[in-house]
Structure formats: C-alpha cells, structure tokens
C-alpha cells in the first residue's frame, strides 16, 4: 500500500491535478458524505506534500480499503502491490466518473476521458490480416496495465519488444 501511494503521490501530472483541486472543486462526494477514492487521495497528497514534514499515515485510505477493492477487507494482510494499484486506480476512475453523473452507463469513449485513463491508460491494437487478400482489420482495446514477461528480459524495453506477437489464425 505505502509503495503504491508513494509512487502515485509523486507522479507529477497526477500530483499537479490533485494539488490544483481540480477534482474536489466539482466533486459531490464531500458535500454528500459519500465515498470518493479520488477525494481521499487528493487529501492524502495535500497532506504529504503541503503539510508538516513528518511521516504521513494514510488513515482515511486504510479505513476505506473495502470500498477501494473487495479483496482488501482484512487489514494487516500482505497484498499484492500491483493488484492494489489496479483496484485503487479503478476506484479513482469510478470517482472521477461519479463527479459528472450518477449514471455509470456513460458511453465508453466518455469513460476513457477521466484523469486516470488519460495518465495511466492506453489502447492496445489488435490487428488481423487476411493472408489471401491482405485486408487488415484493427481493434483498439483500452487498458490500464500491460502484463509483460520480464523473466528473461534485462530491461523494460526488452520486455516490451517481446510483447507483440504475430499469430496465424
């Protein structure tokens, strides 16, 4: 938890967004007293970067672990940092969507415009090419993370080189 919060706190574009209160000025969560992961994280970032220069305990975030991710109901268990990161980013993404509408059935292109998807997301292109006529078809799927095989790669760049694979269907 701490390593993920530390990394996200010091991600410059997200830090700038949160320190400028771009989310909390339009969020209904604090006024309505409802859970908002992005507002909680904004408060954490403000405390960590603008508060006293002492250790920061993310108490409010800890209390809301079950709302952040269903697997985080029991405190004190060692959880996978990657899984927490994905669950936390998803909770922040949902919070960003809620600030604009209570309807979670927004069109997918609109859902991909939150600060979370802009900063951490991307699109994975799947391309199929007909071997007879050479016609190609592309599909673009949004993602927040990419699973890479790093066991035999000496750098992230090498792992990324091995990511796209051609297949004959």
Image: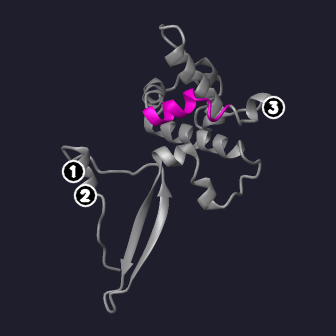
Determine the main secondary structure of the stretch shown in magenta: helix
Q: Are marks 3 and 1 in contact (CB under 8 Å)?
A: no
Q: Are marks 3 and 2 in contact (CB under 8 Å)?
A: no
Specify the segment rendered in magenta.
12-24
- Here the colouring is one colour
- Mark 2 to mark 1 CA distance (whole Å): 7 Å
Tell me which numbered mark, 3 or 1, is placed earlier along the sequence. 3
Q: Helix, strand or loop at disc 1?
A: helix
Q: Nearer the viewer, residue 66 or 53?
A: 53
| Residue that carries the numbered disc 1 in the rendered image | 158
Image quadrant for the C terminus? bottom left
Q: Is residue 105 visible?
A: yes
Q: Nearer the viewer, residue 142 or 82?
A: 142
Q: Helix, strand or loop at disc 2?
A: loop
| Residue that carries the numbered disc 3 in the rendered image | 32
Identify the residue at image location x=43%, y=49%: 145
Mark 2 neighbour class, 10 Å CA radius: few under 14, some 14 to 19, many 20 or more: few
Q: Is residue 52 above or below residue 168?
A: above
Q: Position of residue 23 (x, y in %)?
A: 64, 35
Would you identify the image quadrant in which residue 61 lies?
Answer: top right
Q: Nearer the viewer, mark 3 or mark 1?
A: 3
Would you identify the image quadrant in which residue 33 lies?
Answer: top right
Q: Judge whether residue 8 is colored magenta.
A: no
Would you identify the image quadrant in which residue 68 lies?
Answer: top right
| Residue that carries the numbered disc 2 in the rendered image | 162
Furthest toward the front, the residue is 20
User: As drawn, is 139 to the left or to the right of 33?
Assistant: left
- Mark 3 to mark 1 CA distance (whole Å): 48 Å
Mark 3 neighbour class, 10 Å CA radius: few under 14, some 14 to 19, many 20 or more: few
């Amino acid at each position: 938890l701490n390593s993920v919060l530390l990394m996200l706190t010091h991600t410059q574009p997200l830090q700038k967004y949160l320190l400028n209160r771009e989310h909390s000025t339009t969020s209904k969560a604090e006024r309505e007293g409802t859970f908002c992961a992005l507002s909680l994280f904004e408060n954490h970032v403000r405390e960590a970067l603008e508060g006293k220069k002492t250790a920061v305990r993310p108490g409010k975030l800890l209390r809301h672990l079950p709302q952040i991710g269903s697997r985080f109901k029991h405190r004190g268990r060692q959880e996978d940092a990657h899984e927490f990161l994905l669950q936390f980013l998803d909770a922040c993404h949902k919070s960003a969507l809620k600030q604009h509408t209570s309807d979670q059935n927004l069109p997918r292109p609109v859902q991909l415009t939150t600060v979370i998807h802009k900063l951490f997301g991307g699109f994975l292109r799947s391309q199929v090419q007909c071997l007879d006529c050479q016609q190609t078809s592309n599909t673009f799927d949004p993602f927040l993370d990419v699973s890479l095989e790093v066991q035999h790669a000496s750098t992230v760049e090498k792992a990324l080189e091995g990511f796209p694979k051609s297949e004959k269907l």
